[in-house]
Amino acid sequence: ILNVEQSPQSLHVQEGDSTNFTCSFPSSNFYALHWYRWETAKSPEALFVMTLNGDEKKKGRISATLNTKEGYSYLYIKGSQPEDSATYLCALRSDSGYSTLTFGKGTMLLVSP
Amino acid sequence: NAGVTQTPKFQVLKTGQSMTLQCAQDMNHEYMSWYRQDPGMGLRLIHYSVGAGITDQGEVPNGYNVSRSTTEDFPLRLLSAAPSQTSVYFCASTSRDRGNTIYFGEGSWLTVV
C-alpha cells in the first residue's frame, strides 16, 4: 500500500483569500495523479488528471502543478469563495492496472464569507 | 447522461442481515470498483473489476462479494452485515486510458446496528 499524504488536513480561510494544498507521493511509483473535489452527500467531482512531470492545469480559479521527480503536486485556489468549501482529494495511480489507485485522506477547506 | 448510478442512497441494517448495493454505469467503461469512506481515512478499495466476468480484491475485501455479469452493472453484496461495515460506499468507473477521469456515484450511506 502506497503512502499518499495530503496537507494540511483542514484549512479555514476568508472569502477572497488564495490558498494551496499539497499532495505527496512516492516518486518511484508514479503513473498518474488525480485531484477531486468532494462535497458531503455528493459524488467526488474530478478536477484534474495529471500525467507528465511539470504539468500545469487550470480550471477557472483552481490550478494544479505536478513534480513527479520529487513526488508532489500542489492545488491552488485563487480568490476563494464560500462555494469552494469542500474536501479536496488527491489519488495516485501507480501503474496501468486499475487496482493501483491510492487516495490521500483529503484536505477539508472551509471558506467563510 | 446518467453516469454512475448507485442505489440505495441510505440504508440501515441489523447485524447479520445481508444486502446488495447496486451500481450501474452507462459510459461503456471497462473498469468498475467499490470504495468505502470512513472518518479520517482516504477512500479504500474494496473490490474492482477490469471487465465483464472478471473481479478481484482490493485493500479491504473481507465481508463483501461482487460479480460483473455485464459491462454496465457491478453490485456489491454484504453477506452478513457487521457494525464495522457502517460507512459511506462509492462506486466508480473508468476506462483504460491513462489520462481518463474516474467517475463516481453519489454514495450510499450504510449504518449497521
Image (cartoon, grey):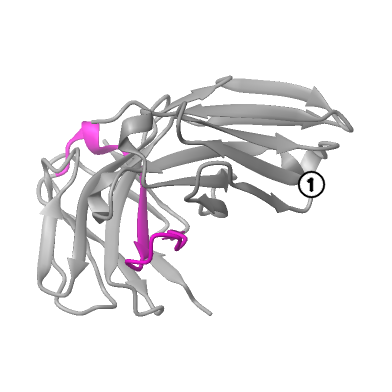
Work out whether residue A10 or residue B101 is closer to the camera in this orientation and state it: B101
Q: Position of residue A68 (x, y in %)?
A: 46, 35
- Image position of A95 (left or right of B61): right
Q: Residue at x 77, y 31 (%)?
A: A111
Q: Position of residue A71 (x, y in %)?
A: 45, 29
From where the camera sits, is residue B65 visible? no
Work out whether residue A1 or residue A94 is closer to the camera in this orientation and state it: A94
Q: Amino acid at mark 1?
A: Arg
**Residue A64 against residue B93 in the figure, above or below:** above
Q: Residue at x 49, y 39 (%)?
A: A90
- Image position of A73 (left or right of B84): right
Asked if residue B98 lies in the magenta stretch, the reply is yes
Q: Position of residue B98 (x, y in %)?
A: 39, 60
Q: Tell me where the magenta segment starts and ends, as one range.
A: B81-104
Q: Residue at x 47, y 26 (%)?
A: A70
Work out whether residue A73 or residue B34 is closer to the camera in this orientation and state it: A73
From where the camera sits, is residue A7 visible? yes
Badge 1 density bin: few <14, some 14–19, many ≥20, Cα 10 Å: few
Q: Dot 1 corresponds to which residue?
A: A61
Q: Residue at x 57, y 27 (%)?
A: A22
Image quadrant where one finds the C terminus of chain B: top left
Q: Can you tell which quarter of the image residue B86 is in?
A: top left
